[in-house]
Image: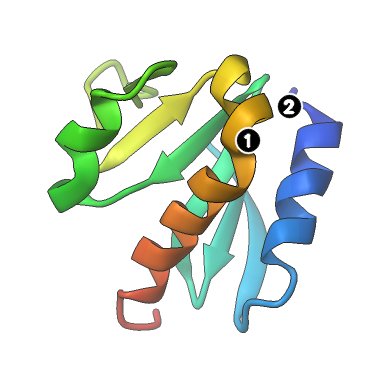
């Protein structure tokens, strides 16, 4: 599974203070889980972020995002964030994923 190790390390640092943080290989990359719920991850050079169904359309309206379509069909509530947005706003995107995952009951 190929993913950007530098980006993984940056995401890991941003999430390190969250309780229940684990990592799991998923979707051909590395996912970061909070209490068993996926928050975000790295696939190739992109960040995948679980923004949730209520924030999905707004997230897609932002530059450098697209539907997460790993299975060939969009996964509602999840987006890919391209490198340009990651460089400018990684902390915000990771926080959004952590916030949504943190709103879910532990698995």
Which quadrant is the C terminus positioned in? Answer: bottom left
Q: Which residue does the numbered mark 2 point to in the structure image?
A: 3
Q: Residues within 10 Å of mark 2 (few under 14, many from 20)?
A: some
Q: Residue 73's spot in the image, x, y percent? A: 22, 21
Inter-mark Cα distance, 1 to 2:
6 Å
Q: Residue 50's spot in the image, x, y percent? A: 38, 48
Residue at (85% x, 34% y) in the render:
6
Instruction: Specify which label sits upstream in the sequence, 1 or 2.
Output: 2
Residue at (72% x, 27% y) in the render:
1
Lateral position of residue 64 relative to residue 5, left or right? left
Residue 42 bears which disc, if any?
1
Q: Residue 53's spot in the image, x, y percent? A: 16, 48
Mark 2 and mark 1 in contact (Cβ < 8 Å)? Answer: yes
Q: Quadrant of residue 63?
A: top left
Disc 1 secondary structure class: strand
Rendered position, 50 above or below 33: above
């Amino acid at each position: 599974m190929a993913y950007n190790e530098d980006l993984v390390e940056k995401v890991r640092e941003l999430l390190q203070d969250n309780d229940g943080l684990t990592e799991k290989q998923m979707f051909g990359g590395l996912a970061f889980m909070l209490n068993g719920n996926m928050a975000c991850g790295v696939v190739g050079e992109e960040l995948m972020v679980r923004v949730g169904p209520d924030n999905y359309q707004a997230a897609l309206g932002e530059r450098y995002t697209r539907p997460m379509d790993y299975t060939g069909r969009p996964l509602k509530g999840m987006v890919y964030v391209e490198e340009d947005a990651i460089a400018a706003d990684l902390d915000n995107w990771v926080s959004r994923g952590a916030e949504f995952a943190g709103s879910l009951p532990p698995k």
